[in-house]
Image: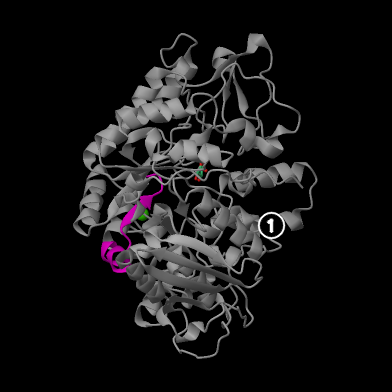
């Protein structure tokens, strides 16, 4: 069976690191390095009016919850007007709020409410493509002479069929769609309803900068650039080698002039406001990633790389591999550039299911272990809503329960190929992104307190035991552990800036590292296994000053308990 229906699960190719450059002291401290970003998937967070869809008023009603978490910034998935082919990643008007989500007035209230609580707002900017229902595309498709024609990529049919391009979301994986109105094909790397914008056109680029300024003038604090690595294209559309789609990142990402576009965006927008910037993906090599984010290049602030989250497979993953990847990235960015740290987002299944252990026995401990990892690594943490409760995969058994467009398209595609659908269903139980999108579990009342109506995506039945209300009351809950460790990170710059050193790298169960900053040294010990495990550090760690531990009862036993996470000051 072909494994191509989720772009984010494709492996990235990273050559060996040779980027040990000179320390760059002036880039050491920056406000955006100190942020703790909490990602909200608005559709699934909180519904205020009973239509089953989360909305801005719902988020507004939980502003105090956000404040109680201690997080300092919110990244909101797209909230713009959209026909919702891909849950808002198909924008039909970049200056309007999706009606289901509310109004511009609600947006202003939300922004003010966040700022009143010292929480910043990062918006998702989806400009590799728009919706086919955007006015630009309607005009563009109407005539070859339209002034919007060059806002998109067209291939006139009299030239014959265009060279094959693979589409991630198309039902036939064909990225060229024939349109009879003008006898031409248009390009869509994602679905047919997501035509790619033509970044080679300076008029289009200016339109995007104006949109960005519209939001920046409202006072938002940053942008996450969706799928931006794909934006630049070789518009001669050369033929790619057979089978290129198995490694499409090499052909699709970091096209010609991408850096020029980012430098232009930086000059036109970022440099004029106090904004943080991050793009989805980090190119195909450390060199690409550095070229995107090194301070002296004036492009983006930080890299958001997938090699770490891509490790988890249905068959599991090896901790030594996990350690190797995160350590390699850290060392490549030790002196220059800056990273994001995350284990989940709206395109992934749940963190505890993929990287921890979602059994009744170990769900809580392994959730807090993973949270400890994210909050004690160098880089800006991006933490996905619901993970602070240890929410798990949904384990849907019927394709009708799924709503994700690429998954449903892939289901049809596999069916047509005569694939083994039982194993397909198993696979999506583990990795379909709907697993991470089931509604937030607020309490044990009907529909988890998410909605009074019918939720747009089924609620995970485990909400009766896993929910915010229950965890609020329990001082040892996953939620209260999250609050504790966030507070520790915020008041201890060692966790943001401190030098990272991996210890005992071959240890198959324990991830151990130190962080050092201004004459302080902290030790982080994480037992990623369900068994008691030990590590030889050459000294007794239980005698050191404990900063935090995910077990409430202390022990003098120098063995880490199952999924124990503990931080010491040395
Ligand atoms: C990014 C988004 C994903 C979306 C895709 C197309 O990968 O994170 O949710 O489907 O781009 O916009
Ligand atoms: Ca609603």
How many numbered marks, from 0 up?
A: 1
Percent position of residue 396, x then y: 61, 62
Q: Quadrant location of residue 266?
A: top left
Residue 44 covered by magenta stretch? no
Q: Is residue 51 left or right of residue 321?
A: left
- Residue positioned 50% across, 91% down in the render: 556
Q: Residues within 10 Å of mark 1 (few under 14, many from 20)?
A: some
Q: Is residue 318 left or right of residue 374?
A: right
Ligand 2 resides in the quarter of the picture at bottom left
Q: Nearer the viewer, residue 274 or 171?
A: 274
Percent position of residue 270, x then y: 31, 35
Picture layout, residue 69 above or below residue 7: below
- Residue positioned 46% across, 89% down in the render: 554
Q: Which residue is mark 1?
A: 427
SS at mark 1? helix
Q: Quadrant location of residue 510?
A: bottom right
- For label 1, being within 8 Å of ligand 1 is answered no
Task: Provide the residue span drawn in magenta.
Answer: 62-79
Q: Is residue 533 left or right of residue 69?
A: right
Q: Is residue 24 visible from the viewing direction of this image?
A: yes
Percent position of residue 252, x then y: 59, 32
User: Which quadrant would the C terminus be assigned to in this image?
Assistant: bottom left
Percent position of residue 183, x then y: 59, 13
- Residue positioned 56% across, 29% down in the render: 188
Q: Nearer the viewer, residue 153 or 494?
A: 494
Q: Quadrant location of residue 383?
A: bottom left
- Residue positioned 22% across, 37% down in the render: 217
């Amino acid at each position: 069976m072909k494994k191509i229906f989720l772009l984010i699960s494709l492996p990235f190719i990273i050559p060996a690191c040779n980027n040990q450059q000179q320390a760059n002291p002036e880039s050491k401290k920056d406000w955006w390095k100190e942020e703790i970003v909490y990602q909200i998937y608005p559709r699934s967070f909180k519904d205020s009016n009973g239509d089953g869809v989360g909305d801005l008023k719902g988020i507004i009603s939980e502003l105090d919850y956000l404040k109680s978490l201690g997080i300092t910034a919110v990244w909101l998935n797209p909230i713009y007007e959209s026909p919702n082919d891909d849950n808002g990643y198909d924008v039909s008007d970049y200056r309007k709020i999706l009606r289901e989500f509310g109004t511009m007035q609600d947006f202003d209230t939300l922004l003010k409410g966040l700022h009143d609580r010292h929480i910043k707002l990062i918006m998702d900017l989806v400009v590799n493509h728009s919706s086919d229902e955007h006015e630009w595309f309607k005009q563009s498709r109407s005539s070859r002479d339209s002034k919007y024609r060059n806002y998109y990529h067209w291939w006139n049919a009299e030239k014959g069929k265009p060279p094959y391009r693979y589409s991630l979301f198309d039902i036939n994986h064909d990225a060229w769609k024939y349109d009879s109105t003008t006898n031409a094909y248009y390009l869509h790397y994602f679905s047919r309803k997501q035509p790619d914008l033509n970044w080679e056109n300076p008029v289009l680029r200016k339109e995007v900068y104006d949109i960005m300024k519209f939001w920046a003038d409202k006072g938002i604090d940053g942008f996450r650039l969706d799928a931006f690595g794909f934006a630049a294209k070789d518009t001669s559309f050369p033929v790619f080698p057979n089978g290129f789609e198995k490694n499409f990142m090499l052909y699709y990402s970091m096209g010609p002039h991408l850096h020029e576009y980012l430098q232009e965006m930086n000059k036109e927008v970022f440099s004029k406001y106090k904004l943080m910037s991050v793009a989805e993906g980090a190119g195909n090599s450390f060199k690409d990633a550095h070229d995107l984010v090194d301070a002296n290049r004036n492009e983006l602030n930080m890299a958001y790389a997938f090699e770490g989250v891509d490790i988890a497979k249905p068959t599991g993953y090896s901790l030594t591999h996990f350690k190797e990847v995160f350590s390699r990235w850290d060392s490549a960015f030790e002196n220059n550039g800056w990273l994001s740290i995350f284990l989940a987002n709206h395109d992934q299944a749940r963190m505890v299911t993929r990287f921890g252990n979602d059994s009744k026995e170990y769900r809580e401990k392994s959730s807090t272990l993973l949270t400890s990892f994210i909050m004690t690594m160098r880089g800006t943490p991006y933490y996905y809503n619901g993970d602070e409760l240890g929410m798990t995969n949904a384990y849907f058994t019927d394709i009708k329960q799924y709503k994700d467009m690429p998954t449903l398209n892939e289901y049809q595609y596999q069916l047509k190929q005569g694939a083994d659908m039982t194993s397909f269903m198993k696979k999506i139980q583990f990795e379909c992104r709907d697993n991470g999108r089931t509604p937030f579990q607020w309490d044990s009342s009907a529909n988890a307190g998410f909605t009074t109506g019918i939720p747009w995506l089924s609620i995970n039945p485990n909400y009766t035991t896993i929910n915010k209300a229950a965890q609020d009351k329990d001082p040892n809950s996953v939620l209260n552990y999250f609050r504790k460790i966030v507070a520790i990170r915020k008041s201890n710059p060692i966790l943001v800036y401190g030098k990272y050193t991996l210890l005992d790298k071959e240890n198959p169960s324990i991830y151990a590292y130190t962080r050092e900053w201004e004459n302080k040294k902290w030790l982080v010990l994480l037992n990623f296994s369900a068994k008691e495990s030990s590590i030889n550090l050459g000294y007794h760690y239980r005698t050191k000053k404990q900063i935090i531990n995910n077990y409430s009862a202390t022990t003098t036993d120098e063995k880490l308990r199952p999924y124990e996470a503990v931080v010491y000051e040395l």
